[in-house]
Amino acid sequence: MQRMTICAIIFIYSVLLSLTASAVDESIPCGQEPTDESINYGDTINCSIETGGDSDLFRLQGQAGEIVRLHIADDNNFGSAIVEVFDPIGDSIASTSSEITIALSLTGTYVLNVSEVGGDATLNYNIAIERVAPTPSPGATHICYACTESNSTNPGGDMDLYWFDGVASDVITIQVSDDNSFGSAVVAIFDTTGMLLGYGAPTVQLELAVTGKHSIVVYENGRNATLNYDLTLQCLVGDCSPPPSSLVISPASGSFASSQTFDFAFILEGRPDLSVVGGSATFDGNDVSANLGSCLISGTLLGGGGGQTFRCPGLDGSALAPGLHTFVVTLDLSDGSSVSDSVIWNFKENSEP
């Protein structure tokens, strides 16, 4: 009877491990030794310290003013991976064997040097990096109020990044739940200035201090377990509505050669949760909506704010009469709102030398 009980316990434990392992490994393997390669926001790279005294280099293109979240995790109970960060002029600005948030003060290439802290052990490790401010990493997922996102952290050290539009004085709650009895999902919330507003689990409640894009980082607290989780965002008090979308026509108003060919685009900034349901366009007062519909190519606006692009490539300036031309576009959005923009293009005659 005792033997059957022990076997049942082992079976249940194995099932729990298999359920946890169902999360997909999101890491990227590093290249062959010697490791010296690029790392981008949103990456989780799996690599190893293969000999005592070994170190690996990762190079990040950073901009002054960016706030960066960096995680490192390893599989060695007798050693520890450590990452040291050097700025573009070679100064050491930070180091960690777990997690750290760094404010970049210079624009250029930052070097992340990973080694074993004692210099005498081998180990496998994962290094992950995200930008949390002033805009989240390009691959960040938008989460809306009263919405739930389901995802997983895998491998250990991995983090998932979400963003939402917040308004100063709004009171919000963020709730995270997971399926792992041996680890715990936690959240860290940053505002558009990079300030850490709150941290914890399963529920964090806070009042927003500024209006703008806010980042939510989800990860396993010990950075050594994988898990599946649900993340829910709620607005309790305040306006609870995101800032309105904006429309930009590119190129902006200006002068152009009548002989040149260029692309023009409508850029719908922010609110990637909305879709375009209609609209109109006029050129010098004439309706050109149907003409545009046949040439526009839709796309995704990269960057933490997110959004959509509608590009019409290869406009031939010679097809337009020299002089001033006014272009007006209005897009109707799925929430019932509309956005508009207009430009004045001046096409010059005989501009070729």
Image: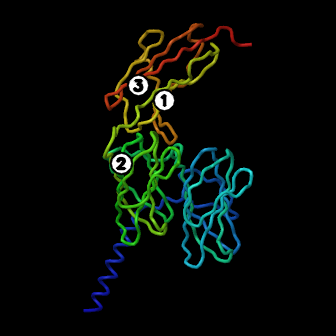
Measuring from the top left, give residue 25's x and y in whole percent. Answer: 47, 62
Instruction: Find disc 3 in the rendering and name its residue.
Output: 339
Q: Earlier in the sequence, mark 3 or mark 2?
A: 2
Q: Which mark is residue 68?
A: none
Quadrant of the snapshot with the C terminus: top right
Lower sequence index among marks 1 and 3: 1
Q: Is residue 121 above or below residue 88?
A: below
Q: Which element is circle 1 on?
A: strand
In primary-sequence order, the first of circles 1 and 2 is 2
Task: Give the structural element (helix, strand or loop) at label 2.
Answer: strand
Residue 42 location (% of width, % of height)? 53, 52
Q: Position of residue 173 (x, y in %)?
A: 35, 51
In percent of width and height, residue 326 lies at 50, 12
Eyeballing the image, is 275 above or below 153? Answer: above
Q: CA distance from mark 1 to mark 3?
A: 11 Å
Is residue 36 found left or right of 328 in the rendered image?
right
| Residue holding disc 1 | 267
Give the amino acid at mark 3: Val
Q: CA distance from mark 3 to mark 2?
A: 28 Å
Would you name the residue on which mark 2 appears?
172
Q: Mark 3 Cα within 10 Å, few/some/many (few <14, many 20+)?
A: some
Q: Residues within 10 Å of mark 2 (few under 14, many from 20)?
A: some
- Residue at 64% x, 70% y is 49
